[in-house]
Amino acid sequence: MSDAFMPLSLADGFASVGQDAWAVLAQKVLGDQPLSSLTTELDHGVCIQPLYTVDDARGRQGPVGSAGWDIRSLVNETEAATANQVALEELRNGATSLLLAGHHDLATVLNEVYLAMAPVALIPGPQQKAQVDWLLNAWQEINPADCAGALGLDPLGVAARWGGAPDWSQLAEATQTTSSLRAVRAVTVDATVYAEAGAGPVSELAASLATGVTYLRHLADSGATVDEAFAALTFTYTADCDQFVTMAKLRAARRLWARVAQTSEAGDLSQHQTVMTSAAMLTRQDPWVNLLRSTVAAFSASIGGAEVVTVRPFDSALGQPDEFGRRMARNLQLVLAEESSLSSLIDPAGGSWFVENLTDQLAQAAWQEFQTVEAAGGAEKALASGRWAAEAETAAAARSARIADGSEEIIGVTAYPNPEETPLLRPATKDQPAGPLPLRRWAAPFESGGTA
């Protein structure tokens, strides 16, 4: 056998050292500080340890995502004609689908957009019937096999973000209408509303499970089969600049939903997973750092196995993004997918002692929280009673306290601010939601004139 193919053991020549021996040496370095000071607690008892071993990952790999992802560009311009120009520009320059927000004149917005080639998804929002009906009618004009996208029906998520009572009127009919369109999802479980309001990853996962199960029950009560109900759902999660937590959260979400599907005796145990980079992590001060935050978030989403990724432009927190902001949001995904070849990988974090352990912790904690929510009346009760709003507010306040005392830093705002910075100016955006779970940007209290 050639030496080039001889097995390589990197541990040869080194004495075997156990975790106990490491702990003794680490304690010497720490002095009076306890070893526990190296442990970071997230939420609901989930902890990040300073050291992991093979025992932390053994036998814990769950469902994996697929190679590659759909680069979905956000189109939220106020004027329909402008939105159409942006949509066409995005598709011509590398985006593979569109995410539309708050547009009523879809005939104008999607003029010259070939729906047989470009999937279209709607962001959940109030008074969405006209958009849903238009899109359903447009899909009827093309081959059903070419129809792809999402209608964005999310009664609980819309009530959480915008206020008011959940609107269930379209759920059953839209699910029935799209049951023969394999690549169309009628119902969206948008968990980003909870994360953007301040909730941690465990709460975001638990809320998505409770909401998803509530939708399954509504669809089953309306006559849908188990498989039709599961096929109607897509889940949207946030990706932020905490790289490993984002990876583990997405992996945990698939594992948790597979358990729900298995318990329900569904034929398909997979979770259709879309990801949006976090609006809460973006800053108005030194917004150029947002490019780094968004790159880490998109990288984490791809490694975590997301099927669809939307990157918010770096200048989103300032108002309506300009062409440069949109181009950077689109191109950073193209670089990750094509130049870094991430689109060729399937679950590259699988087997990582740290990521597998964190995935397991998040899944277990979220499942326990989900059971608590179910025992207290389910997702509708958790939203209506103010439980989820209160939990998100408490978590947001805790983060603000950490930022205030310096234990958590925001580059460009609380750490290394630029006193000579020339502020970027962007046009104002549409009216912001005013529901019980508002957007709480992490940096807002610490920026001059700070607002969300």
Image (tube, rainbow, N blue to C red):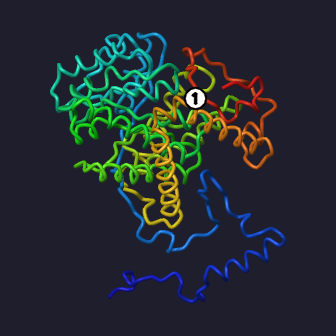
Q: Quadrant of the N terminus?
A: bottom left
> Does residue 1 appear left or right of residue 291 in this picture?
left
Instruction: Report how many numbered discs are placed on residues in the image.
Output: 1
Q: Mark 1 belongs to which amino acid?
A: Leu
Q: Residue at x 28, y 16 (%)?
A: 133
Query: Vertically, is 221 above or below 423?
Result: below
Residue shown at the point (55%, 38%) measured from the top left = 195
Residue 383 in percent (x, y) is at 51, 31
Of residues 90 and 377, which is closer to you in this image?
Answer: 377
Quarter of image, res 452? top right
Left or right, 23 with reference to 158:
right
**Identity of the residue drawn at 42% across and 59% down:** 348
In the picture, measured across the screen, residue 170 lies left or right of residue 17, that is: left
265 on left or right of 12: left
Q: Position of residue 359 (x, y in %)?
A: 49, 57
* Quadrant assignment, res 4: bottom left
Q: Which residue is mark 1?
A: 437
Residue drawn at x 37%, y 40% as measured from the top left: 213
SS label for mark 1? loop
Compared to 5, does 337 lie above or below? Answer: above
Question: Residue 422: x, y in percent?
Answer: 74, 25
Q: What x and y, as percent, mark residue 415?
A: 77, 42
